[in-house]
Amino acid sequence: MKFSQRKSGTRSGIDMAPIVDVIFNLLIFFALTLNFAISSGIKVNLPKATGEIVEIKDVNIHIAKDGKVYFNDTLMRSANSLKQEFQKIPNKDTLVIIRADSESLHGPVVSTMDLAKTQGFSKIAIGVEPKR
């Protein structure tokens, strides 16, 4: 068998342009995916939202910017004192409204919600200011 070169000037072989395009697109895709995986997240300014207006006859818990927890305008020194206040409420269908400062940490809010849930309260809401 003899292999001869074509004299017409055309080259046979694999066209590399589509392969380079695919590799380049994959490189961009993985670079962007890695960038989003490393980023810490989106900064949001909470708690401004549209919602229902609720009367302040229910249990109100305020969480200040520094993490201090107030139960109906009374400062709670510990989680145990907050637990005792929850135990004093006979009606467990009472709505518990947690009004956390927009710059407060997430931890006190979650622990307060968890404490209310473990004490038998099923109606827990987050208080927000209405959007204007």
Image (cartoon, helix red, strand yellow):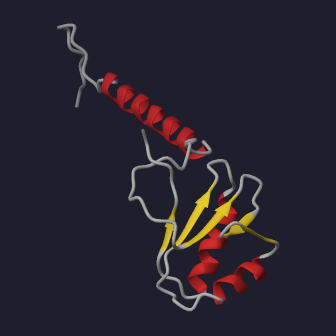
Residue 67: percent from the left, percent from the top?
Answer: 75, 59
Nearer to us in this view, 85 or 115: 85
Residue 12: percent from the left, percent from the top?
Answer: 24, 21
Residue found 72% across the figure and 86% down from its top: 84
Q: Is residue 93 left or right of residue 99?
A: left
Residue 78: percent from the left, percent from the top?
Answer: 80, 75
Nearer to us in this view, 108 or 30: 108
Q: Is residue 3 above or below residue 126?
A: above
Residue 10: percent from the left, percent from the top?
Answer: 21, 12
Residue found 23% across the figure and 26% down from its top: 2
Nearer to us in this view, 74 or 48: 74
Residue found 65% across the figure and 62% down from its top: 62
* Total tally of numbered discs in the picture: 0
Residue found 46% across the figure and 31% down from its top: 28
Residue lying at the far bottom of the rendered structure:
90
Quadrant of the image containing the N terminus: top left
Quadrant of the image containing the C terminus: top left
Q: Is residue 14 left or right of residue 105?
A: left
